[in-house]
Image (tube, grey):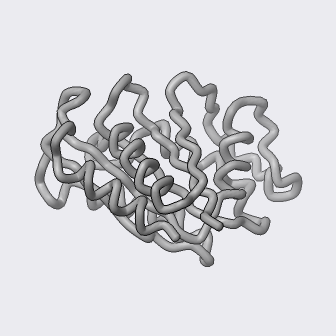
């Protein structure tokens, strides 16, 4: 039986390059026999964490928005994949907000073990994704049973759709195929 894979696309741009990476990963994971759910943060209501820490006792955020549902889906998945555009050499604000809102997972049992990061950026410098990776690994480090299982970085893609025919789409597909 395959794994439950949740893929979160944090770009708010329609047909974004990072969302195409997410779709390619989903195709590979499905082909490998896994159950996938691809979720876009576009159109989602997601408030900022207020740091009240009530979620550490209730295991749920007090805010009534999409954050609680997304956090629960992440906690129940075997594999979590985050797709993000690189903004100022870091993850998107939407993704950072979601990671902060997953604070209710910290004191409870979570299922995910493997976490993947898919990134697209206008800058094609190989060092461009380093801070984004560092930002996500800071979150992963708070969940000691999990690890960063893989990274795909597509640089030199600016306009929506620029990623078509780039080798990184195939790399994302292959990464998805390795989920077992």
User: Residue 109 location, x and y as percent?
Assistant: 77, 68
Indicate the quadrant where residue 22 lies. top left
Please report the residue visible at 61 percent of the width from the left and 36 percent of the height from the top.
48
Name of the residue lying farthest toward the bottom: 145
- 160 lies above or below 18: above
Please report the residue visible at 69 percent of the width from the left and 49 percent of the height from the top.
73
Left or right of residue 11: residue 53: right
- 158 lies above or below 170: above
Please report the residue visible at 25 percent of the width from the left and 27 percent of the height from the top.
160
**Of 151 and 45, the residue lying toward us:** 151
Left or right of residue 129: residue 66: right
User: Residue 39 location, x and y as percent?
Assistant: 55, 38
- 180 lies above or below 139: below
Left or right of residue 101: residue 86: left
- 46 lies above or below 61: above
User: Residue 17 location, x and y as percent?
Assistant: 29, 36
Please report the residue visible at 27 percent of the width from the left and 61 percent of the height from the top.
130
User: Residue 145 location, x and y as percent?
Assistant: 62, 77
């Amino acid at each position: 039986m395959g794994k439950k894979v949740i893929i979160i696309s944090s770009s708010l741009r329609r047909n974004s390059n990072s969302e195409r990476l997410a779709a390619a990963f989903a195709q590979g994971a499905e082909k490998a026999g896994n159950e996938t759910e691809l979720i876009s943060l576009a159109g989602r209501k997601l408030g900022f964490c207020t740091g009240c820490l009530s979620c550490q006792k209730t295991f749920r955020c007090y805010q009534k928005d999409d954050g609680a549902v997304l956090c629960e889906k992440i906690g129940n998945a075997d594999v979590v994949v985050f797709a993000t555009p690189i903004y100022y050499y870091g993850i998107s604000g939407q993704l950072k907000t979601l990671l902060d809102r997953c604070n209710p997972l910290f004191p409870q049992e979570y299922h995910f073990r493997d976490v993947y990061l898919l990134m697209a950026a206008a800058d094609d410098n190989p060092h461009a994704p380093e801070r984004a990776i560092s930002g996500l690994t800071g979150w992963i480090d708070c969940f000691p049973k999990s690890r960063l299982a893989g990274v795909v970085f597509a640089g030199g893609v600016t306009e929506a759709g620029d990623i078509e025919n780039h080798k990184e789409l195939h790399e994302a597909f292959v990464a998805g195929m390795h989920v077992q």
